[in-house]
Image: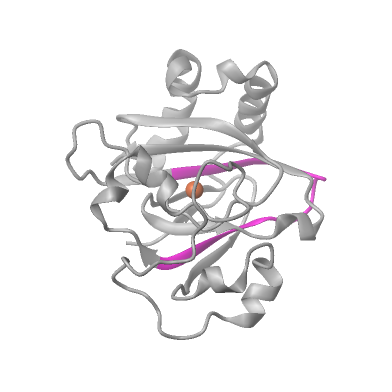
């Protein structure tokens, strides 16, 4: 179980095609609702990586502020505990050449509430792009918390958009810089967040993100 990064797995042409679809209107960006457009491209990208596109749910997203610590939750339509992964494909960052990262923690949410979409709200922290979730300060239901203080240098460099106290009990699995061309696969219930990318000069970032049973 880990975060897998497939380098140079998507061409510039394919990225531009997704960005054009996004520009053409938000209604077209929901992948499943427009499967005729997106599925052939996704299959061409993912099949060589050994990723099968079965049941999935996702969209092309536009973010202007970093997302706080959260798990994506499991995507389950039948109440069983599926093996759900999130696929992240960085598409664009503005200004071009500026840096953004996704920070992955060692901690995984294995609680039952993590099974469904509501679980997505469970670990949504302060400063997330939506204000619908509760602020996270307590990870006590997780089973593999760290007893070490969270790394202060990493906090200052990457995570200073949130309170230091929100990181208590968490430890770093990987800090992955967005490289265009990469396709990233990770467990949907692994806690993760954005880096403090506004501090790196980023005005916005676009990415394709979906959860899939696999
Ligand atoms: Fe996420």
* Residue at horizontal 60 percent and vertical 45 percent from the top: 181
In the picture, measured across the screen, residue 100 lies left or right of residue 176, that is right
| Quarter of the figure with residue 141 | bottom left
Examine the rendered structure and indicate whether residue 79 appears above or below residue 191: above
* Residue 203 x/y as whole percent: 79, 45
Q: Is residue 204 visible?
A: yes
Along the viewing direction, whichever of 21 and 164 lies nearer the viewer: 164
* Residue drawn 78% across the image and 60% down it: 199
Q: Residue at x 67, y 29 (%)?
A: 16
Looking at the image, how many numbered discs can be counted on the residues?
A: 0
Depth order, front residue of 51/33: 33
Q: Is residue 124 above or below residue 132?
A: below
Residue 210 placement, left or right of 102: left
Whether residue 113 is situated above or below residue 56 in the rendered picture: below
Q: Quadrant of the C terminus?
A: top left
Q: At which x and y percent is residue 201?
A: 82, 55
Q: What range is drawn magenta here?
A: 87-106
Is residue 166 a member of the stretch shown in magenta?
no
Q: Quadrant of the N terminus?
A: bottom left
What percent of the width, then of the height, locates residue 200? Answer: 78, 59
- Say if 143 sits above or below 184 in the image: below
Main secondary structure found in the magenta portion: strand
Q: Residue at x 44, y 75 (%)?
A: 169
Q: How is the image coloured?
A: one colour
| Image location (x, y in percent) of residue 77 | 25, 31
Q: Is residue 90 magenta?
A: yes
């Amino acid at each position: 179980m880990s975060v897998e990064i497939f380098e140079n797995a998507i061409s510039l042409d394919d990225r531009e095609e997704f960005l054009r679809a996004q520009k053409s209107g938000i209604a077209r960006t929901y992948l499943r609702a427009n499967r005729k457009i997106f599925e052939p491209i996704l299959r061409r990208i993912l099949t060589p990586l050994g990723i099968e596109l079965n049941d999935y749910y996702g969209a092309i997203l536009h973010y202007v502020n970093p997302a706080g610590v959260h798990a994506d939750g499991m995507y389950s339509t039948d109440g069983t505990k599926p093996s759900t992964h999130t696929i992240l494909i960085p598409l664009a960052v503005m200004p071009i050449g500026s840096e953004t990262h996704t920070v992955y923690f060692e901690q995984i949410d294995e609680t039952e509430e993590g099974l469904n979409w509501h679980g997505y709200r469970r670990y949504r922290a302060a400063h997330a792009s939506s204000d619908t979730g509760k602020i996270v300060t307590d990870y006590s239901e997780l089973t593999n918390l760290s007893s070490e203080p969270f790394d202060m240098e990493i906090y200052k460099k990457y995570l200073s958009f949130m309170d230091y106290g929100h990181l208590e009990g968490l430890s770093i699995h990987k800090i992955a810089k967005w490289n265009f061309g990469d396709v990233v696969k990770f467990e949907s219930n692994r806690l993760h967040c954005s880096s403090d990318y506004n501090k790196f000069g980023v005005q916005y970032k676009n990415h394709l993100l979906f959860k899939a049973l696999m």
